[in-house]
Structures are given as structure tokens and as C-alpha cells.
Amino acid sequence: MSEESKPVKGKGKEKDKEKEKEKAAKKLHRAIDGLSKDQVSQLLDLNPALANELGSGSNDDPNAVSEALRRLNLQDIMTGLASSGKNVKDMGAYKFWQTQPVPKFGEDDPNKPVEEGPIRNQTVDEIDKEPAPLLGGFEWSTIDLLDDSQLKEVWELLNGHYVEDDEAMFRFNYSSSILKWAMMPPGWKKEWHRGVRATQSRKLVGFIAAIPVELRIRDKVLRASEVNFLCIHKKLRSKRLAPVLIKEITRLCNLEGVFQAIYTGGIVLPRPVSTCRYYHRAINWQKLYEVGFSPLPPNSKPQFQIRKYAVPERVSIRGLREMQKKDVGAVQDLLTRYLAKYDMAAEFNKEEVEHWLLHHKKDALEEQVVWTYVVEDEHKKITDFISFYCLESSIIGPSKHSNVKAAYLFYYATETGLATPTDKEALKTRLNALVSDTLVYCKQYKFDVYNALSLMDNGLFLEDQKFGPGDGQLHYYLFNYRANPIAGGVDKKNRLDTENLSGIGKTQI
Ligand SMILES: CC(C)(COP(=O)(O)OP(=O)(O)OC[C@H]1O[C@@H](n2cnc3c(N)ncnc32)[C@H](O)[C@@H]1OP(=O)(O)O)[C@@H](O)C(=O)NCCC(=O)NCCS
């Protein structure tokens, strides 16, 4: 959601919420009292939005910060901290996560780089061959996504119970096509699509998935997994089922000899390796306004906003065209060289580039998930490419619209950025042209909004292309791997950092 937007709620509801907030605030204050000085500093380092709320300089004096934290109301504290009160409650006591091989808050000296590497070393022989037992009435189930009825079950669970914004106005609605795309890349394993069913009704009530990824962190390449789509039916929340699912996917990955993982989330857990911010570029401003996604800024009028977000009629780059199968090799080569500059990125082979970037037109029944455009110069050389994927969100409350169709900026690369020494101005100009041209396509394909994070080189064009800062953050986590922090593209005040660009070259669907 856009930064300034605060949806108007009915009065009764607001009051109930006030009471809940008061209760949560009390608990939170108790948790704050339990934080050490180091933990307070780390908390602020990891939550630029929160540091921002507290004002500049407060980071230097942990006592003052604790005091200031106590004075804030819950909503203020939650800015950039968590997507729900649930997470705040657990701030002082990560009962599950403190047992896992992840770095803890306050354990490293922020001024001393750590030696990067695995936290726990194990061999496949040491791993349980059987899953941990579930609560009575529930059982494990491996989900076969090639079976349309099982794919539909996953879709139904996520459609009703997956990630919502803080105000419960929107919920991600991953289409069946995007689920297949995201969970079945080359090398995917059926065993890594793990569900929990109610034994009697057979209903799918929990899910977690992993896919294989060659993940480079600085100079080391890990055979890792990427964990995603953790979801528990709303009626089974807060029963400590999430840790059971997380331990199960860990076991299944370990059995394949994979001991490291990457995952992302909007909530703060021990301990993000990087934190990026969401940015949103309105395409259909009127609709975004009507559904409560975009506010009408003070002193503005709808027609001014609509004019502000007008999109060029035509693309500007000569030689820009849709990616075709014959481009896979050139795109893979360009992407590999481009991603080399980031501290963290995936290493993609040709099959993976084809999977993630090429839309197969022959699957007439499949909805298009990814759009990729390449620039071919007069010598038939591919000099640039840029891609985005489609992810809709359902509108939860009453509205004349049922969904918001969002394009998410995905991977891009350009020869312009690869010249040595890097000509930052030339790169900025080129990226602006590429992104501006994708706006034309986003409009053509009837997207309502174009979303991007502060990762890769996005700091060079987000503001120029009228992407506004959102209220969401995306934290990157590594499982069983200690790594020094990676720049997320925003400064301590959660503003776009155009000087110190992000070191993140990895997106997650
Ligand atoms: C995320 C979700 C599965 C958590 O389930 P829950 O019933 O709220 O939580 P449980 O009681 O089962 O477990 C709580 C533990 O899981 C951890 N946890 C919660 N969400 C987590 C997440 N997204 N990633 C990792 N751990 C998470 C909590 O920190 C807590 O551990 P702690 O004691 O160490 O702090 C559930 O809220 C859900 O389905 N939400 C909607 C989908 C979603 O947000 N998915 C995550 C996408 S990143």
C-alpha cells in the first residue's frame, strides 16, 4: 500500500481495534524492557523505518531509544517492524527461531565483519528419515502439482489464507499458472511441496514449498533451497504449526543434501541479512484510489493524479521486442555477467533462464505469468532485457472492484552497466528508458500498478519513473548461513539510497 494511505474504517471496528492495540502495546512495552542495548541498536539497524520514526541520532543512544520506543503507540512501532502484532509479541522471545541455525540479534559486533559460512554442519546420515508427528487429526501429505486437483487445493488454501496487508484490505491471489511457474522450475522436487491435511475431511490446511537454487553470496556459491508459500489455514493459527512445517521442509531439503536456504518475509525474524523497501507506480490511479491502495494527497485532485501517472503512448527504445526462444543463450550470458556485481544473486543456467523469463505461447490455456523484452541492436546482438511478472491481489472488503492486477519488476540487465569503469549516468539513463518502456506494456496489458523493491540498481530509476515508497518492507533471510549484512537500497531513514545501491540481485516470487 502507498505510504500515506490509511483506510477509513467504521467507528465500532476502530474502537475494538483500539482496545486490542492497547493490550498489544502493553505486551510490547514489556518486551522492549527485556531488550539489551545491543538488541536495541540492531533492531534499529534492521528497521530503518522505525529509526526514522524515532528521529535522527537516536540510534546512538540505546537508553534514549528504549525510552522513545516505550512512548510510541503500537502503530508507530510497527512501521517497518512487523506486519502484525503477533510478531511484535514475540520480539523478545523467538522460542522457535532461537533453536534454529540462524544468527541471533545482538550476537555479532556490528563493526566487525564475520567470517561467512554455515552455522551448523550435518551430514545426510544424521537426518531423520521420517517426519515429526503432527497433532492428532492431522497428517502429512506430499502435494503433486502436476495433478490439477491438487494444484487447485493449494490455490484454494493460498487464495483464502495467504499473505494480507496490515489492514486486511488485500490478499495475494497467486494464479494456478504462477504457482506452477514459481514452484516447478528446472530441478523441482515433488517432495518439497509439502502439505498438512485434516485426516478426516482430507482438507489441505497447511503448506510449505521449496525449490532448488544455486545461490551465490559474495564469492561462495551454495547449493541451496528457496523456501516459499508457507501458509496455515486461519482456523489453525497460533498453534505452533509453522515451526513444524519449517522443520519438515528443512528435513526434506537436508535429505537431498541441501543444508542452506533463502527465504523472504514482511516480518522481522532473527535475523535479516538485508531489508528492501517496496515501491509502487500507479498505472490505473483511479482504481487504486477507489480500492484504498493509493491516497489522494492533500491539495491534489484526482485529475492531477491521473495526469501525473499518465504513461507514454509508445515505447522509445529501438530494437525492443518480446523475448523469443532463440534469445535464451544471449539473455543468460548477459544476466550472468550483470548479476555478478551483486553480493547475493542466483546463478541461472539456460534452462532456468528459459523457465523464468520466456513466455511459452503454445500453452494457450495458461495465463501469461512473465513478460520479457529484449533489445536487439543492428548487429543482431542482444544488448538489454527487462522482465516483469503478474501477481494479482484480491480485495477483501466490499468494493466495486474484486482485484488489483500488479506487475512486479523482475530481472533486467544491460550492456550499458557492464562497461568498465561503470558509467553510472549512462546506466541510469538506460535503465530509465527500459523501465519507462515496460510501463507502456503494463498499461497495454491492463495492469493497475507496477511494483518494485529497492534491490538491484532500482535506486537509479524508481523516483524518476514515479514509483512512490510503500509501507511494506521485504526482509531477506538465510537459513544455516552466517553472512555479513547486504545493502537493501534504502538508508537508515528508509529513504531510497541512490549512492549506495543494493547488493541484492535475487528476487523471490
Ligand atoms: C505465517 C503463518 C504460517 C504463521 O503461522 P501462525 O499460526 O501465525 O504461527 P505459529 O503459532 O504456527 O508459529 C509461530 C512461530 O512461527 C514463526 N513465524 C511466523 N511467521 C513466519 C514466517 N513467515 N517465516 C518464518 N517463521 C515465521 C514465528 O516467529 C513463531 O516463532 P518464534 O516463537 O520463534 O517467534 C500464518 O500466519 C500464515 O499462514 N499467514 C499468512 C501467510 C504468510 O504470511 N506466510 C508467510 C509468507 S512470508
Image: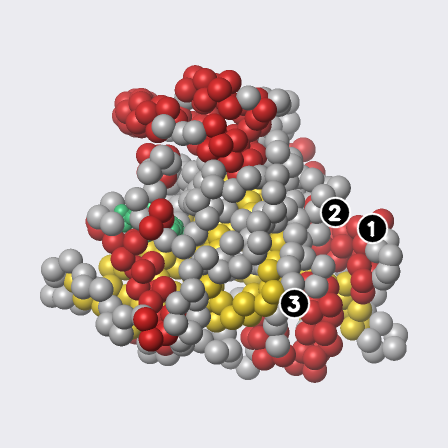
Tell which of 138 and 99 is nearer to you: 99
Question: Tag 1, which secondary structure?
Answer: helix
Dividing the picture into quadrants, the one containing residue 4 is top right
Of label 3 and label 1, which has the lower sequence position?
3
Q: Position of residue 474 (x, y in %)?
A: 52, 47
Numbered circle sitting on residue 424: 1
Classify mark 2: residues with Cα within 10 Å, few (<14), some (14-19) or many (20+).
many
- Looking at the image, is 295 positioned above or below residue 388? above
Question: Tag 2, which secondary structure?
Answer: helix
Dividing the picture into quadrants, the one containing residue 506 is bottom right
- Write the residue at 49% across / 67% down: 224
- Write the residue at 39% across / 59% down: 229
> Between tags 1 and 2, which lies in front?
1
Tell which of 107 and 209 is nearer to you: 107
Q: Position of residue 505 (x, y in %)?
A: 63, 58
Lateral position of residue 397 relative to residue 105, left or right = left
| Residue 279 is at least partly visible in this image | no
Q: CA distance from mark 2 to mark 3?
A: 20 Å
Question: What amino acid is at disc 1?
Answer: Lys
Question: What amino acid is at disc 2?
Answer: Leu
Question: What amino acid is at disc 3?
Answer: Thr
- Looking at the image, is 240 positioned above or below residue 68? below
- Looking at the image, is 283 positioned above or below residue 320? above
Q: CA distance from mark 3 to mark 1?
A: 24 Å
Residue with the mark numbered 3:
372
